Every structure is written in structure tokens, then in C-alpha cells.
Image (tube, coloured by chain):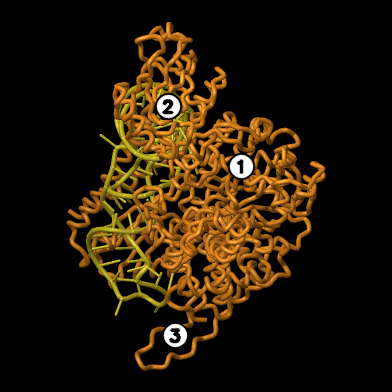
Amino acid sequence: MELAKAYNPKEAESTHYQRWESAGFFAPEINQDPDAKPFSIVIPPPNVTGSLHMGHALQHTLMDVLTRWKRMQGYRALFLPGTDHAGISTQLMVTRQLKKDEGKTPQQIGREAFTAKVWEWKEQFGGTITNQMRREGLSVDWSRERFTMDPSLSRAVREVFVTLYEQGFIYRGKRIVNWCPNDKTVLSDLEVQDDKKQGKLVYLQYPVKDSDRKITVATTRPETMLGDTAVAVNPTDERYTDLIGKTILLPLTGREIPIVADEYVDAEFGTGAVKITPAHDPNDYEVGQRHNLPQIEVMNLDATMNENAGTEFKGLDRFAARQLVIEKFAELELLEKEDDYEVSLPLCERCKTIIEPMLSTQWFVRMDEMRDMALELMRAEHSPQFVPEVPHEKIYTNWLENLKDWTISRQLWWGHQIPAWYDSEGKIFVARSSSDAAELAGTSDLVQDEDVLDTWFSSALWAFSTLGWTGEVTETEELKTFYPTSVLVTGRDIIFLWVSRMVMTGLKFIGQRPFYDVYVTGTVLDKNGQRMSKTKGNGVDPLDVFEKYGVDATRMYLSGAASGIDIRWNDAQIENYRNFSNKIWNASRFCLMNSEGAKVDPASLDLDESDSIADKWIVSRLNKTAQGVNKALEEYQFHTAVRLLYHFFWDDFCDWYIELVKDEIIGGRPSVVAEGEEPPPPAPPTAEQAAARTRIITVLEQALRLLHPFMPYLTEELWQKLPGVNSELHNSAYAKADNSVMLTDFPHNAWTDEKAEAEMQSVIELISRVRNIRSELNIKPGERVSVHVAADAAIQNVFRANEAQILKLARAAELNLSESLNVPKASARAVIGGAEVAIPLEGLIDFEKEAERLSKETEKLLAEKQKLDGQLSNANFVDRAPAEKVQELRERVTDIEQRTNSLKQTLEALK
RNA sequence: GCCCACUUAGCUCAGUGGUAGAGCACACGCUUCACACGCGUGGGGUCAGAAGUUCAAGUCUUCUAGUGGGCACCA
């Protein structure tokens, strides 16, 4: 069989996925072992109308690597896909489109028509992200795909809401909330981001009633003074003690407000006097509560001023009002000064509008009980296990400890409408359905709450709502098998928004944690270390990368970079894995070109003493690699697994094993024929040759299995081409399934051979030394040298057994093995572990160069010896270090002495 | 303000108290019949700085500097 000369990822990427999916390989049901242990991952559901970014690609790759690996180990593996309705962002997107297409606002077409439009939009574009997930090669079970607004998931949402309400954890109340005047909805604290900006600190003077005195307050939001209902000072602040209890004549409003004393005020900051606006500032709200101050709302929901602000201000935007307040104070000569000041502004995470703190009636969840459950789980069982543990466990714990109530209502139309109904008197009935509510109320003359729930409310239930839990149905086979899930893979930005809330709802409603481990990925940054973002336009589109380098190379790169810290984008590195893909392809191509008489046969790797050193060596290396990969993946050390695979395949298998056995494998094939001449047919392979071909192709097959979780397409493409592959190579759980590398048994053989590895190391070292001498002394590639080696009998035997390979790879004409060297003076020399090497050079090189080379090497060795001598002459070291360590150093010194002596002799001889 | 992480070759990064590593880049050589997306060889390090613990520190502790992140405050 002849393969193309270079790997073309597109071919493989266009065929295998469909077959895997339609053959049912992704569904846990493919596993026929009734005792199989479960392994499950639920995907962090991406926005249904979103598209794939590099952060997804990273997380998805890692989840798929784990799933494919566990599946091959015989676990009943489930990787559950789905999408999130993403309330605000989806509604914004459709609103924008509606404006563009029809020039209308959602309000103009009404709630029903609008939500219908969003569903339409979802049907139209919801496939984008899932198609991209297919392209990534994700082995997710599409038959279990979920959407957060599926009927059963919506039932789960209502059930949780009603239960929490009935138990008193959900309540409705008027509080200061984060209000986005642009999106016209409330936001939770987590959806607000801080931004530092250069602004002004404005000092306003308030006259004290029945006095000449004025009290100066500083503010960054002067317009809120229209809603001031007090001025507060610190009770211990002597500057103001006599004013406490007095009254302020609030300019521009004609209102009289008290001066109150409150610990909240920091006497050191500003003027030590603070204007108090309970309706428009969270801290002032608290102060207001303590002093029974009235709450005067001076703004509308769009952040324009309302009638309470006075006729001059009514209708003005908050920033225009701010300017006008300043002007008016200046006119009244009550404007003391304006200082430049760095203000931190709360911004809406979505639209970047400045958040206005407002008094508003909303729904809240009291988190105390659920928080304590989550903290107790961490305290008692150290769960979930964060990877990396530092710093995430501490951040998670601290956040929980300081958790406040969660604002869950949103003034949107897209989402789960709050299951609360009001009668004509405004009485609230919370129920699972409108008919239940009607029954509760004794009337069907009810109006449902207009608001919907925070998107993260339904996401919080994802780990069990996707497995069939609805509240009515609380025990399903799916839940029993796959809950708790094995691991959650996600980014650090949603540890609070999502991870913690899943833990809390899971404990509360299922009585068990939702997952054992949480693997937190780093952030993918651009090549300058900047966060990738749409607005900056510095994002790298995964699809472009797939197109350019292939999906497998990208997956390999992302896995290889995943050590828990941020990943700075590096094209050169992906190119490297593209090259690696090609290397795998070509190594396979070589094996297949010489596969006549061979077939994949795991028994061919059961070796004994009689087998060659090279064979024992490569199988030992293979098994160690498999063990290392398994261990690395157990510990989520993806980059370690990648490194092991890369070096095993490229260095051990390609650079050495293929080269060592090449002649044996190829033998019998006609050598190059003159142009125009017909090549004679190849001779049929001998039994030994067929065995060698079987062995190399079996090692290759094992390597493809190890690589499969990372490089699914390439490995399947090649595996299918190997002679003799069949379902007998599958893990026994998949014995009856159609052939696929993704169902083979993941290698885990324990057999190793340290002796063979050491012997092979000697051969490699000998060849490398000879090559080094050739290269340093500019010996032409065509020159065949004689290699003389002095060594003990055991090493001689090793070299003798590999003579043909040594001659070929060192480009030598002859190999002379003896107890001691007997070579012309004009020879290049080197010392390797346990052996001396010499190459007679008469007529090949100039001696000056060789002298230089030898001096350089001697210097290197002497520098090392000096260090070692220093250590060994330290009595403390000899006394206290482990005896074997001391012995090791002594041996090393002896070795260096031998080498330097030998090199000195050679140098002398050259003179 | 509090807490955390990071700082290793020109670049991007691994590194488990015991001889400092990879890929790329660089230099030299190679149409060696799987692969130039390749093969061979080589140069390149005060492991941010300082102090400490230890027989021994890139690795553990403390401090300093720089970079990044989280939390709080922000009248």
C-alpha cells in the first residue's frame, strides 16, 4: 500500500467523524461490559448562538482527550454536549437584528412575537457551534444533547425555584441593585466589571440651617445630590461633633436633611463628610437603613432624571444632570473645587454601559444554607478537587465565605419566566404551573411575573438536569450511572458564576456533589500576552488554525500547552505539531511500504531473551511511555503526556528504531534501478523478515492507540490502513463493535527491560560519538571510516550484535572490537560509558582541528570534575549525603579521570 | 489596601532537593531509496536580585523588583 508523501489532514477530517457518530461509538451504550465503571463529563454549555473561540477549543480538547482515553480503558464513557440559552447576550443579538431587519424594537412587536423570533434565530444559528464541535472531533453523545430551555430542563428550573421559595430561600424584595440603563435589566454582582477611569471629585458646599457654616462633601456623582436625604460624619470626628443632629439646607431642592453620625464614614478621606443618597448607592442605602432615612429615587430606568429631581432636571440624562448640578453650584458659589480623580466605574459586562445602582424590586436567593453545604464538603472531604489546587481552591472557598444573596430576576424576555403569579391585589403565588397557581389563588385571574431568571440559574442545575432530573422525576438510570460526574473542565472566569453554584444546587437537590474534580484551564492569550477579545480583534479563530495546520496538530498543541497556567499563542509550536503529524504519517508510510507478509499482532511484542536488543529496547520504551501517559492523564498533566508521546515517537521510534531495523525490513526489495528500467518484482519476505515487519507495525499500532485521544483523525486514518486490524484489538467492552482505533484497548503493559535499554543506550552513544567526530572534523559523508572500540566482553557482544546497524548509521567501513586499542597515532578518540573509541584519520583531517576538539572536550570534563571534587572533599557531604549518592559521584569522577587521561594521551600523540 | 501566581537559552515554555531540558530560531554538513513539514552535528544559561535552611537549592523559607491575576475599598 502506498500513501501520499505528505499528510493531508482534510481527507481524514472529512470522513471518520461521521462514521464514529453513526456507528454509535460516542454513546456509552457501545460499552457491552455490564461491570464497566462510568466516566462522565458534562460540557460547559456554550452560548447557543455563539461560535467557537480558542478557549472553547482548549477546554473541549482536554475533555475529549480524557473521554477518549477512559473509553479506551473500558470505562462506560459519556461526554454530554449541549448549549445555553444565554439570556442577555442572545436577546441583545436578536434585538440588534430586529432593528436592522424591520427597524423595530422588541417592545413594538411584543413578548410573544419576540420570543418566537429568538427561537427562530436559535434554530437558524444554533447549529454553528455544534457543527464546530463536530469539527473539533469531540466524541460527545449527540443523542443526549441538551439545551437549557428544553422542556425537561425548564421543569427542573421551575421545581428548584418553587422548592427554594417554599423553603424560604427565594424571596422578592426592594433592594439596591446593579442596573444597566442600556439593557434595562438588573445584573448580579458577578456580571458587573470594574473599570478605572480618570474623572473628577467634586466638592460641594451644603449650608447648615440657622448658621453661617457650610459643610463640604465630595462626590464623583454630583447628580445624585438631588436625592440626598442626609449628610453623614464619623462620630469621633471633632471637626463635626457640634453639627451632629443639625440640619442642612440642601441646595437646588429646597429640602432640609439631617446631619447624622455613622461609623461608615472615614474621617481621613475627602472632607470627612459624606452625602447620603439611599436610593442610588449601596453604602448609602445601608446608612439610610440605620438612620431611618427616606429613599428618594431621582432617576428613571433609562438613567434620565425623574420628577423627584426637580423641574429643571427632569428628563435630563444623568451626565447632563451632573454638569448642570455643577454649574448651579458654581452660580450659587457653593462649588468649592473640582479635583482630578481616578474613579472606578462599574460597567455592564455585556454592553459596557456604566451601571447605575438603583432601588428596585427583584427576586433574590438566600445562599446561606447552600453555601454552608458547599463549604462543609470542602472542609470535610476536600471536594471538589481543583486542578491546579493553588490558587483555585482558596479563591473558591473565600468567595463562598463572603457570599451575598443572589439577584436572580432579569428584565428580559428570553429565558425561564419566573413561576410566580400575581392576583389583582398583587398577592404572590409561586407554583410549578399556571394551573397550580390558580388553584393556590382560588382564581385564574392571575398575571405571571414578567421577568425571567438569570441564565446561570438554569446552568447551576446542568449536571443533573441534563441527566433527566426534573423534580417530578428524581431518580433516573442516567443519574444513577453518571452522577456525580467525573470531572468538570472549565475556565477560571466561571468558577463563581457556575462551578460553585453547581456544587450548591447539586448538594441541595441531589444530595451529592456534581463532580469530583475541577480542572481549571488557563486563558489563551495572543502572541503578545494580551487577552484575546472581539473588540481588540486579536483573537485567533480555531477554524482558521484547523484549516492551516489540521485539527489534530491544534489539539496536540493545546494539550501540550495545558499545564494550568495561561497559554501565550505560539504559531511556531503548532507548526511543530503539524510537522509531527507528518512525521507519524511518514513513519506509517514506511511501515506500510514494507508490510508484505506482516500483520498487526500484539503477541509479537511478547519478547524474551532471544530477541534482539533493539526489539526489547523499543518495546520497553513503548511500555514505559504508555505507563507515563496513563499516569500523566490520571493527574491531568496533559503536557507531560504530550511530551512523552512526542519524544517516544520521534526520537525512539523514528530516529532510532526504524533506522536500526530498516535494512532488515526493506531487505529483498530491489535497490534503485536505472532510469527507464523496469524494477524487478520484490522477493517474497522470509519468515524472519515477516516477523520483523509484524513487530514494527505492531509497535506502530500501539503508538497510534496512545496518540489517539490527542490526534483522533490521523490515528484512525492510519490505523484503518494497517494490515490485520480488527475488533480483536478492541478493549473487551467493545468486542462486537466495528473496527476503530478509538475502541482499542489503551496500552498499559508492565513489561520493561532495563538491561536492553542500557545496552541500546551504549549503541546509540557509540553511533552518536562517531557522528560527532565526523561532523566536527568535517569528514565527508561519503568517507567510510574504521571504528575501533576497546571495551569489556559484555559491551563488545552488544556492539557485535548490532554491527551492521553501527556500520550503517555511523557510515563506517569496519568495526574493530578488542580489549585495548591498538591504532595509529593519527586517530580521533572519544570515551563513552565503558568503552574507548578511536577512528584512524590518516589523510582525512588536519590535526589542529582534532587537537582543538579534544581540548574543548577535556576542558568540559575538567570543569565538571572540579565541581565534583569540591563536593567530595566536603566532609559534611560525605558524612551526611546518602551513601549511594556519594558512590555515584565517586564513580562519575573515576569515569571523568579515565576519559581525560585517554584524551590527554591522544592529544600528546597528535603533537 | 489584602491575597495569589509568574520571572529558566534569542523567542515560547517544561523541570520530581542530587551532572540545567524541549520546540522554534541560529551555525555547519547532507538530493543517506518514510518524511526538506526531513536527516546528522554544534554553539547558546549568574535559572530576576538578595539573604537564609541544607552535605547539596532552578526546586524549600524570607525579603526586594518586575509582570499578570483575584478580592475589597473607591464619598
Asked which quadrant contains residue A141, the reply is: bottom right
Q: Can you give x and y, in whole percent of width and height, for residue A764 in the image?
A: 42, 59
Q: Are marks 1 and 3 on the same chain?
A: yes
- For chain B, give the colour: yellow
Horizontal side of A640 relative to B56 (left or right) equals right
Q: Can you give x and y, in whole percent of width and height, for residue A610 in the image?
A: 58, 64
Q: What is the chain letter for disc 1? A: A
In-front residue for pair A15/A703: A15
In-front residue for pair A600/A745: A745
- Label 1 or label 3, whichever lies nearer to me, is 1
Q: Which residue is mark 3?
A: A670
Q: What is the chain letter for disc 3? A: A
Q: Which residue is mark 2?
A: A225
- Label 3 or label 2, whichever lies nearer to me, is 2
Q: Are marks 3 and 2 on the same chain?
A: yes
Residue A515 appears in view: yes
At label 2, the amino acid type is Met
- Disc on the earlier residue, 1 or 2: 2
Residue A241 higher or lower than A804, as above or below: above
Asked which quadrant contains residue A842, the reply is: bottom left
Q: Secondary structure at mark 1?
A: strand
Measure the C-alpha gap from mark 1 to mark 2.
29 Å
- Disc on the earlier residue, 3 or 2: 2
